Image: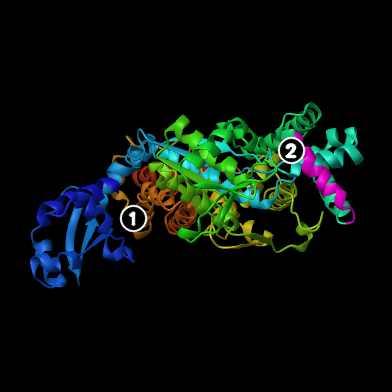
Amino acid sequence: MLEFKAQICSILSQLTSLPGDEVETLLEIPPEAELGEYAFPCFVLARQMKKAPPEIARELASRITPTALLEKAHPVGPYLNFHIRRSGLIRGLLPAILEGRGTERAAQEGRGKTVVIDFSAPNIAKPFGVGHLRSTVIGHALYRIYQELGYQAVGINHLGDWGTQFGKLIVAFRRWGENERLQEDPVQYLYHLYVRFHQEAAGDEALEEEARQWFLSLEKDHPEALALWERFRQLSLQEFKRIYAYLGIEFDQYQGESFYNTMLEQTLQLAREKGLAKESQGALVADLEPHGLPPCLLQKKDGATLYITRDLAAAIYRQQQYRFDKLLYVVGAEQTLHFRQLFKMLELMDFAWAKNCVHVPFGLIHFKDGRMSTRQGKVIFLEDVIQRAVELAQRIIEEKNPGLQEKEKAARMVGLGAVIFGDLVNDRVKDIEFDWDKVLDFSGETAPYIQYSHARICSILRKVSRGAAPEQAAELGLLTAPEEEQLVLTLARFEEQIMRAAADYRPSYLAHYLVNLARDFNRFYHSCPVLTAEENIMEARLVLIDAVRVTLAHGLELLGIEAPEKM
Ligand code: ARG
C-alpha cells in the first residue's frame, strides 16, 4: 500500500508541480472502501490553477493512465480518488508478508535516528500501581513500534529512587522496621512504612523534621543513610524486575533519579549562568512567569534538590549520551505542568533539541470492580490486577476448551494480553473505565478476540499440516470474493497504521486495526470455506489466512502481547 501511495505522490507531483511530500501529507483515506484507497483534495490547487476544485479533479483524472498497481483515478466532487488494482496488490503483498517483508517500507522511516523513551518509572516505597501500568504498556508499545520503523530505541526506566520520601523511609525503618518483613515483601512493606510514617507524623511534627534531616544526610553521603537507601532500592528493584520479566519487558537502562546526583551541581551552575535560576531567600528558583508558567524551584534553601532538577540533568545527559532525535516521556497527564516547565527551561538554556522532547500523557484508570481498589487504601497493586486477569482467563479457557494442553501458558498469554490491550485500545488521553467482563470478552474489541482469531487460523493450518506456500498458489488471482478483497485491503494497511501510531504516539490505532483485521478475517471465514474449497482456491485461501496469521501475531507483538497457537 505504501508503494501505491508513493506512486500516487509521484504522479501527482509531476502533474501539479506540488512537491511529493506535500502531496503525501494532503492525501486522505476515503471513508468508504468503494471510494478507493486514497483521495487527493483538489482545493489546494484552485488558486494556482484558477479553476474550481471539481474541474481540477476531472482534468487531472483524464491525464492519469493506469499502471500495474493503479487501476484508476476518478473524480468525486472536489476530490481525486485512487483505486488500487487488487490483483496487483494481492500478488505483491501476500508473498511479501509471508517472507517477512511486510513492513519493509515503513522500516525506512527511522533509519539512522534515535528515540529515547522514558517509561514505567515506578517509585521506590510506593507500590507499582496501575498508573505505572499505563506508562509501562504504552511506553513499551511505542518502544516496539519505533523499533519496527527502524529507529534505534533506548528504553529508560527513570526510577523514583531519590527524594524526600527516602528521609521518611529511613526514619520509619529505624523506628519500626523489621528486617524479615522487608526481606519478604519489600515493595509492600516499604509502602506500609511510608503510610505509617504519615499517620504518625500527623500527631508528631518532629518526625517530619527528622525525615528532612535524614534526606539531607543522604544527599551528603552519610554512610548509614546510604546503606539503608541502597538496600531499599535493591530489594524494590528486584521486585520490579520480576514484574517486568512476567510482562516480557526489558529496559536498556535503569537510570533512576539518583543516577543524576553527581550532575546536579553542574546543571544548577548552567542554569545560573544562563540567567535562568536566581537565589531567592536562600533557595534557587527559575522565574517562568514571563512564559506564562509558575516559578520553578530548583534547590531548596537547605540545599536539597528536586524532581525537576534531576529531570533537567537527565535530559541534558541523555542528549549527550544518545544524541536523540526524539525524547518521549510517557507519564500521566497530572504531570503536564512539570513537563511544560522542564521543556521551557531546556529551551531557555538554549538547547535547540528542547523542541524534540515530548510529553506523552495519559489519563487515569478506574476499576469497575470495587474489590480491586481497597486492599490498602486507594492504591491498586499491579500484581493483583495481573493475577486476577490470569485467573479469569484460566476459568474461561477451562470452560471453552477443557482438553487444551499447556492451559496455564495460554491463560497467562490471554490474561496478560487482556490487561495490556484493555489499556492500549483506549485513546490514551482519556480516562479508562476498566471492566473485567469487557476486556476478557472473546468477541469484543479485546486481545482474546484477536488471539482467538489467530489460534483459529493456526488450527486450520495444522489440519493441512503445513504452512501455505505462496509459490504454489499461483492462483492468488482467484481471491476475488468481496470478503477476500476486503481482507487483503485491510492487510495492506498494516504498515500505515504502525506509522500513524508512532507519529501520534498512539498505540490505540494499531490496537483498533488489529480488531478490524480479526473481524475481517472472521467475516471472510464465515462465507469462504478454506479446507473444503476446490484445490486451487484452497491454496490461495491458505496463503491469505497465513498472511493474516502473521500480521495478527506481528501486530500483537508490537503491542507487547503474545499470541498462543492454541487456546
Ligand atoms: N517516578 C515518577 C512518578 O511515578 C515518574 C517519572 C517519569 N519520568 C521522568 N523523567 N520524570 O510519578
Per the rendering, the mark at residue 216 is 2
Q: Which residues are magenta?
A: 203-217
Neighbour tally class for label 1: few under 14, some 14-19, many 20 plus, Cα within 10 Å: some
Q: Is residue 434 magenta?
A: no
Residue 418 point in image, percent of width and height: 62, 51
In the depicted view, which residue is nearer to us: 383 or 457?
A: 383
Question: Can you see residue 548?
Answer: no
Residue at 70%, 53% in the rendered image: 396
In the depicted view, which residue is nearer to us: 128 or 469?
A: 128
Residue 272 point in image, percent of width and height: 51, 41
Give me the C-alpha separation between circle 1 and circle 2: 67 Å
Per the rendering, the mark at residue 190 is none
Which amino acid is tagged 1?
Glu
Determine whether 489 is above or below 44 in the image. above
Q: Is residue 215 magenta?
A: yes
Residue at 34%, 54% in the rendered image: 489
| 164 left or right, relative to 318 | right
| 461 left or right, relative to 107 | right
Q: Main secondary structure of the magenta part?
A: helix
| Color theme of the render | rainbow
In primary-sequence order, the first of circles 1 and 2 is: 2
Neighbour tally class for label 2: few under 14, some 14-19, many 20 plus, Cα within 10 Å: many
Residue at 22%, 55% in the rendered image: 23
Question: Can you see residue 342?
Answer: yes
Residue 81 point in image, percent of width and height: 22, 62
- The secondary element bearing badge 1 is classed as helix
Per the rendering, the mark at residue 485 is 1
Q: In the rendered image, which quarter contains the C terminus?
A: top right
- Name the front one of labels 1 and 2: 2
Contact (CB < 8 A) between labels 1 and 2?
no
Which amino acid is tagged 2?
Leu
Residue 283 point in image, percent of width and height: 63, 47
